[in-house]
Amino acid sequence: MNKYENVAQDSEGNVIENATVTVKEYPGGANATIYSANSTAGGNVNGFLTGEDGSFEFFAANGRYNVEISKPGRTTKINYNILIQDLSSSDGSSLVGFLQAGTGAVSRTVQAKERDIVSVLDFGANTTPGTTDMASVINAAITAVSTAGGGVLIFPPGNYLHNTAITLKNNVTIFGYSATLTWGGGAASQIATSSSATLDNAGMLGFKIVAGASATTVLELRSLYKCVFRDLEITSDNTSNLVIDLTVNTSGGTNPVSTRNSVLNTFENIYSHGDCGTFLRLKGDSATPTVVTLNTFIGINAENCNVRGIEFHSWCDNNAFSGVCRVRTVANNAVGVEWNTGTPASNVGVYANNFQLLAVDTFGTLTGRVGITMNYTYANRVDYFYQDPQAEGGAYSINATDAKSYYIGHQVSGTTDVVVRQKNFYIGGADNSSISVGGAVSTESTGIWAGLNRTGSGFSSLNLVGDTTYTTYGFRILRGNGGANTTTNLLHRGTGALQIKSEDAGGGISFLTSAATRITMNDTGIGFFGASAAAKPTITGSRGGNAALADLLTELATLGIITDSSTA
């Protein structure tokens, strides 16, 4: 209840003592229940008298009333539609006006103005570190904002403990600069979306997220449409978890463009540290199919990845990583970025996922780590690829199996070899194509290996195709599969000549076995068994009637080995 007080006056402004005061409800006109004090103990006192100075007061519940003053022989007046209200009550702000500065501004109540932005404190959240599970009040706040049509939900600075998942909802952006979300639950997802509906036009900005060792997925994001995740710092201590799982639902509601795809979302300035299994997984589904596509990632930095840094699992395409994307692998056999982990030998819709600048750190003495692994995929691009030095032997900078039409440019790999491993490696198109090895080197060695780091015997070959008849090879250099002492063959197809030529004047060609020169050829001539090359000899003198000698000289001249100028 609240107090009302006034002075009874006549129409000329004179006070009226000992006048009768009657309070009626407005509208309606029924006698109201009022009290002489802020208590119901004295009962209803409606119909009381004013004091000798004309003053009067009473207590009544919040509401609107008419106050009638009457006294025989005096002309009195009625106070119509008076408001009795405590402004500190929950709806008190609805009674106070607000007008924004500027031409065209319209009048609103303070309550309407304040409801433009909602705080989790409005729903009873507690920012004291680690004291109370805030999941229910946080989710209640998110639901309220979403139900009201959407908006921004503010998390003031503080540490918000939650033991069950925070569920993001449509049209709600949660804003938490200087706020921390701390997971206190078990093996489950810390922050999630519905498994039966899309998440549209929502987001998270500015949070520090502490996942600890138990959260299996930190951000489980299903069927997102035009959502924004920006300025997030994520810490975890789990070597097998997923930090961000961008995936899809295969049933339930659809987004405004009638799909369940995760599409047109932005992830910017995301930093993950502490141990994790895989930092980011993109995973669509073959149903329909439902894909993860047209998403943008800007400024990604993932520390201490034990399984993978970034994983393109299946049914994900045309996702772009702008700016610097850096991952650090810290376990044996960990992979920086891997395309098609769903069904590595089959086409599962993984293509055109591109990086502007990809850096993979592989510090430490470990084994088997890989910078890039491309399984069955195509049309992927990395404009700049940098892999920091690594100590382990046999690790691949690029491991591409069944990958097609990919581009990796401006590649730097610390002080170690850059190794590309691929089942079938295709270069070409409508224009002339080539492979260049050793560009811009100085005194460093360069080379091409086929079959490097073999674990068993098998064929290795270099095959050249220059026509449409011999489509497997026109010329082949083939190393056999018979072990250390197998044969090596030069194979030439067609009726044209196999030419071995020393192009420049003064050059030569030598054939050696072990360290011994067997044949030497140059511009002067030819030499055998270590002899210097000499010009073609001319044989003169008499054959003395020797028929065998005459026949030998004729055959040698026919072969072009000598010039026969002998006489009979």
Image (tube, grey):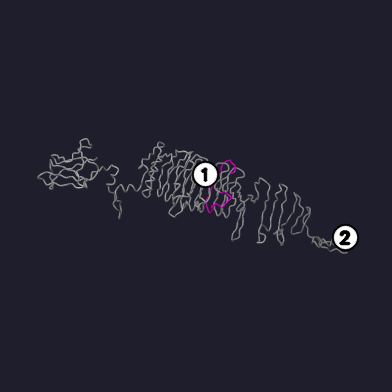
Q: Nearer the viewer, residue 101 or 332?
A: 332
Q: Which residue is mark 2?
A: 548
Q: Amino acid at mark 2?
A: Ala
Residue projecting furthest to the left: 73
Residue projecting furthest to the top: 41
* Quadrant showing the C terminus: bottom right
Residue 363 highlighted magenta (yes or no): yes
Sequence-earlier tag: 2 or 1: 1
On screen, 535 above or below 398?
below
Which quarter of the picture shows residue 559?
bottom right
Q: Which residue is mark 1?
A: 278
Q: Amino acid at mark 1?
A: Thr
* Quadrant showing the N terminus: top left
Principal SS element in the magenta part? loop
Which quarter of the picture shows residue 435?
bottom right
Q: Are marks 2 and 1 in contact (CB under 8 Å)?
A: no
Question: Badge 1 local density, few (<14 within 10 Å), some, or many (20+)?
Answer: many
Q: Nearer the viewer, residue 283 or 498?
A: 283
- Asked whether, in this view, residue 507 is left or right of residue 168, the answer is right
